[in-house]
Image: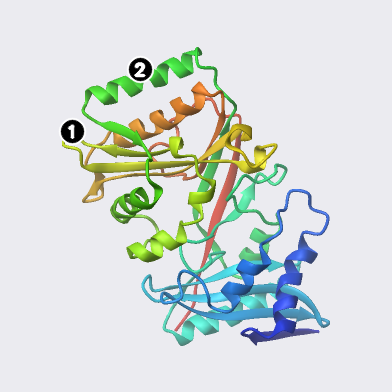
Amino acid sequence: MYGLIEFTTEQEHVNAFLAVAAHVYKGDKNYSPERASDTIAWLAGKHNFTGLLEQKNLLVLRDNAPAARGIAFVNKIGGFGSIGFFECMDDKQAVKLLADSAAAFCRQHGISNIYAPMNGSIWSDYRLMTRGFEDRPFLGEPYNKPYYSSLLTECGFKPVKTWETQFVSKVEPRSKTAQRYLHEEKAQQSRGIKIRSMKNFDTDIRIIHRLAMNAFSQFFLFHELDESDFVNAYAGLKRICDKRTIKIAYSHDNQPIGFGIALPDYRSRLGFFLRYAKRYSLLYIGTLQENGESVYPQCGKAIIVSILRSLFLRRKGYIRAMMSVDSKTRHFSKEYENIHEYTLFGLEVDL
């Protein structure tokens, strides 16, 4: 027997919401438990996107035991709905009850397009892993059970966009690959593009905000974030970043024209220290755009080269993380040994 609970902050239901993930991933060595305090804050509507999102917390019970969970979101600026914090047992009926309730909530707000999984915005966690389950996830990588995608499909959702991650072991500084990158780096410098490492996080994150709002404006489901929301959303990077692998590109007249962010993958380390991280995740590359085209066509390549060169010199491996399969720089690296894939699913409902 199934039941649906809509709730806010009632402790009994919050505990059951958290219990779904605990049951789903019990004994799974690749799963890193969610931070309960963060999830509880989201359930209470206390997060960086409070003014942006409407939400409804949903819990499905099967025979009085937690079977599926999610938060139905309406993104008021983007004009779309989503199901975030999605976790479930392998139970189509439970997921269908959850999805139907989320659809009804979105319909009430005049929203016909719903995406899953997505925590309300592309500026938060989204996407479902569809390949790579045998490996331990890197820092920030989506992870879920393999059956999640089939359950969403059976409930009417369809794949709408796909991404992939490429994994590359360390490249020796004297190798042909490293020398190729050195040659590319010098070529970009001769074109007047200067790449600088981050110096002051609080100042440079604001430069990155301005660039990101321009560079990503054509991305799927993009919506703007004001500076304060962006800074708050990415404040956690200050504690874990390596400034040597956060780059800002400048034009010949010293104007910022692009950025790149690579973070140490602390899940590959022996301790929470930069020197112990075995590899880095190249997460974001953005360049100044005009009419959907890069104003400086070689800028993105220059940023990637600068970051990878710094990693090669320290004999670090790297991850080209969560690139759209449509990305122009997807085939920039030819040395990758493994690939993970992710999908975002969508559902269109009648109003």
- The answer to which image quadrant residue 91 occupies is bottom right
Q: Earlier in the sequence, mark 2 or mark 1?
A: 2
Q: Are marks 2 and 1 in contact (CB under 8 Å)?
A: no
Out of 20 and 328, give the one closest to the viewer. Answer: 20
Quadrant position of the C terminus in the picture: bottom left
Q: Position of residue 265 (x, y in %)?
A: 59, 41
State the SS at label 1.
Answer: loop
Q: Which residue type does callout 1 highlight?
A: His
Q: Residue at x 44, y 39 (%)?
A: 243
Instruction: Examine the rendering and report whether any part of residue 74 can be seen.
Output: yes
Q: Which residue type does callout 2 highlight?
A: His
4 w.r.t. 257: above or below? below
Q: Position of residue 49 (x, y in %)?
A: 45, 71
Q: Which residue is mark 2?
A: 183
Q: Which residue is mark 1?
A: 252
Q: Residue at x 25, y 43 (%)?
A: 256
Out of 92 and 50, give the one closest to the viewer. Answer: 50
